Amino acid sequence: MRDSAWPARRDDGQGEPGRETAEDLLTQVARGDEAAFERLYPLVAGPVLGVVRRVVRDTAQTEEVAQEVLVELWRTAPRFDRARGSALTWALTLAHRRAVDRVRSAQARTDREERFGAESGTREFDEVAETVTTNLEREQVRRCLGSLTTLQRESVVLAYYGGRTYNEVAELLRAPLGTIKTRLRDGLIRLRDCLGVA
């Protein structure tokens, strides 16, 4: 009775008749034999998945890394050397290396994100103090605007808060351009004095 874990060997004249070792199969895979890879897969897939699972510990990533290892096993089979160890040991070494690389990569990404978050989260000023200062400045400007004459206040508000040109202010207020310029100059001087700006 044949052990079901060891598929029947095609007669290629190597090893014990009727049995294929993982090493035999990997040698055939190195020659591009897809059928040999199909027979090798059930021998190595479970142990590869187990090694990756112990290192990675994330189900989705474990399956992805195990798949990458099996693809790498197919791709790099010509590098397998029987003299240096068994096919399973070689496959598990590939699995361990790939899993460790994934963990290191994930850790490096996490470290970068944390570093970026810490750097971008650091403020060069106290946000509360900045808000209070801004509000106080606004209140002071409102108070100082209130100290201007109605004509000066209208001119300043239209020009500096409304973004209007001197000509547009003159048209809106139906006053000569020279008068508007004088109102603005006088209004700004009074604002400067009220705000204590040098």
Image (cartoon, helix red, strand yellow):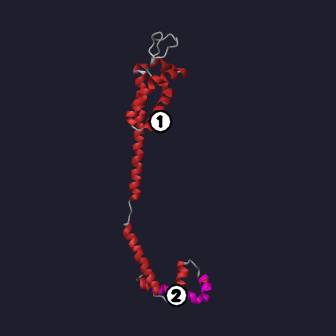
Question: From this viewpoint, is residue 32 visible?
Answer: no
Identify the image quadrant of residue 147. Answer: bottom left
| Residue located beneath label 2 in the image | 152
Q: Residue at x 40, y 28 (%)?
A: 93
Quadrant the C terminus occupies: bottom left
Circle 2 or circle 1, nearest the eye: 1
Mark drawn on residue 64: 1
Viewer-closest of 104 and 11 = 11
Decide: few, some or many residues near mark 1? Use Cα within 10 Å; few <14, some 14-19, many ≥20. Answer: some
The answer to whether residue 32 is left or right of residue 83 is right
Whether residue 81 is situated above or below residue 169 in the rendered picture? above
Could you tell me what secondary structure mostly forms the magenta stretch?
helix
Quadrant the N terminus occupies: top left
Estimate the spatial distance between the alpha carbons at disc 2 and disc 1, rounded to whole Å. 73 Å
Please identify the residue farthest to the front as the structure is shown. 1
Q: Amino acid at mark 1?
A: Glu
Q: Residue at x 42, y 28 (%)?
A: 48
Q: Position of residue 81 (x, y in %)?
A: 44, 21
Q: Position of residue 91 (x, y in %)?
A: 43, 26
Q: Position of residue 39 (x, y in %)?
A: 50, 20
Viewer-closest of 72 and 1 = 1
Decide: few, some or many residues near mark 2? Use Cα within 10 Å; few <14, some 14-19, many ≥20. Answer: many
The answer to whether residue 14 is left or right of residue 173 is left
Q: Amino acid at mark 2?
A: Gln
- Residues in magenta? 168-190
Whether residue 109 is situated above or below residue 8 in the rendered picture? below
Q: Is 171 part of what is drawn in magenta?
A: yes
Q: Secondary structure at mark 1?
A: helix
Q: Is 182 part of what is drawn in magenta?
A: yes
Mark drawn on residue 122: none
